[in-house]
Amino acid sequence: MPDKTLVKRYILEFHERDFTGVISRELRVKTLPGRATVIIGPRRAGKTYYLFSLIDGNAPERYLYVDFEHPVFHPMTPRDFIDVLDAYHELYPEIKRLVLLLDEVQAVPEWERIVRYLLDEGYTVYVTGSSSKLLSREVATHLRGRALTYTLFPLSFREFLRFKGVEHGGREFYRNMAKINGLLEEYLHFGAYPEIALAPEDVRGLILKDYIDVLIKKDVLERHRVKNVYLLNELLYFSLRAYSKYVSFDSLYRLFKGRLKLTKRTIANYFAYLEEAFALFLVRRHGRSPKGRIVAPRKLYLIDTGLALFGEKDAARDVENAVFLELLRRYSTKPGVEVTYWKDEAGREVDFVVSENGRVKELIQVSLRLDDERTRRREFLALLHASRKLNCKNLKVITLEDEGTVEVSLYGMKGNIELVPLFKWLLGGERLISSCDEV
Ligand SMILES: Nc1ncnc2c1ncn2[C@@H]1O[C@H](COP(=O)(O)OP(=O)(O)O)[C@@H](O)[C@H]1O
Ligand SMILES: [Mg+2]
């Protein structure tokens, strides 16, 4: 049971904190009476700071922030939480309408009972956690209809520029164009964790290495009974080399089985743990047959391109990974939207298929450059084939520099393909252009 004196000291210290360094994020969450607002996302994406950004600087006492990973709150049962509330009310008897900020709730068993109790008592409740599965499972079973769930990812390029203090709207875009281009390189190379964006270059590697270690220890090992820590590490470091590439559990199995005692199931499980901890994403192939979708190789993307500094860096694959993450940011809250890849029997590939409730909305190809005639032809041809097969005319190629619309006609297939430079697409493409027109 938490010690009340220590809890009171914790609360008071929190109210004395200075939140002026907290930079605002793009995520906008809603609160509804009787519902908790749940924010999930990878460790270090900025969930705790996001909670801080919700605090009204003029009345911080109205907020009760509880970090469930803090030693003061261990061990804790749902019943013990009443004592924490009491401690708060003894300090601030005049405040009735307080807001609860519950951070990293998965650290306390049966946390959902605490949340249900607080909602029943009429409190406003925000919850964060860094396990996709634990949280969505508890929310779906015990908080059904009583939560709104959002995901917070590392910084978008727009947020990254804000963290760097560089304006990009309207005229400022043209003034800062050289800077923005340089920052795009940094964004792709060192990734988009908020702390990395703010840190001097010489310590970024150390911080990222620490993130990897903590992720393995806290978000995988402490949550699951992993027997083969060596294999888990191997799979993670393999992923840091193989991002934006296909992975097949079968070939990984063949690769490891001579050296280690393992089953294919173990590999699939360990990847599931890494996905659950938001370390990586395994994208499925587009297709109707459920069986085909399951056996087809997945495409692997990392939560952050900076992590690849501990694997094998590749500029083209950084770009593709960054596009994937931005698609997640844009669509992860839209119900029914799915991002897959497309590949046909002849081996033609389209990097991203965005569909909504089963209807294909957009086909996106990512390529560093298109000056090489063979690359150009290959990318366009795949798009035209996919366009015909999936009945979608919204075709796009994202590259570093190319811009405009091209009418392509190949082997009797025709289509208009839009070429968009990466920075424009990341900054919101169309929106940017229209805001520039107003200048
Ligand atoms: N909005 C922000 N403004 C300024 N710094 C931030 C912001 N978000 C994150 N950071 C930096 O990144 C670090 C990790 O963020 P944090 O909120 O603790 O992540 P999480 O709670 O998701 O693990 C912080 O300690 C801080 O240095
Ligand atoms: Mg946190």
Image (cartoon, helix red, strand yellow):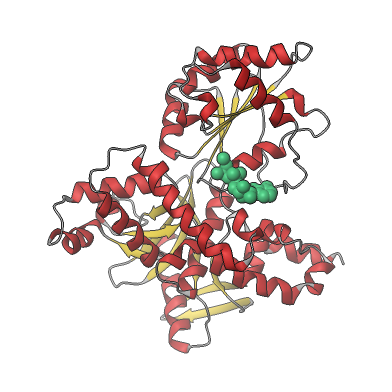
Front-most of residues 377 and 97: 97
What is the quadrant of residue 401 in the picture?
Answer: bottom right
Residue at 13% x, 52% y is 261
- Taking the view exactly as shown, the residue that stands out farthest to the front is 5
Residue at 53% x, 24% y is 73
* Left or right of residue 25: residue 414: left
Q: Is residue 202 above or below residue 359?
A: below
Residue 309 placed where, x, y %? 46, 67
Residue 195 placed where, x, y %? 61, 54
Give the total number of marks visible in the rendering.
0
* Left or right of residue 87: residue 173: right
Residue 125 placed where, x, y %? 62, 24
Q: Is residue 105 above or below residue 343?
A: above
Residue 310 placed where, x, y %? 42, 65
What is the quadrant of residue 133 in the picture?
Answer: top left
Say if residue 155 shows up in the picture. no
Front-most of residues 295 and 185: 185
Q: Is residue 133 above or below residue 286?
A: above
Name the image quarter holding the C terminus.
bottom right
* Left or right of residue 340: residue 264: left
Say if residue 353 shows up in the picture. yes
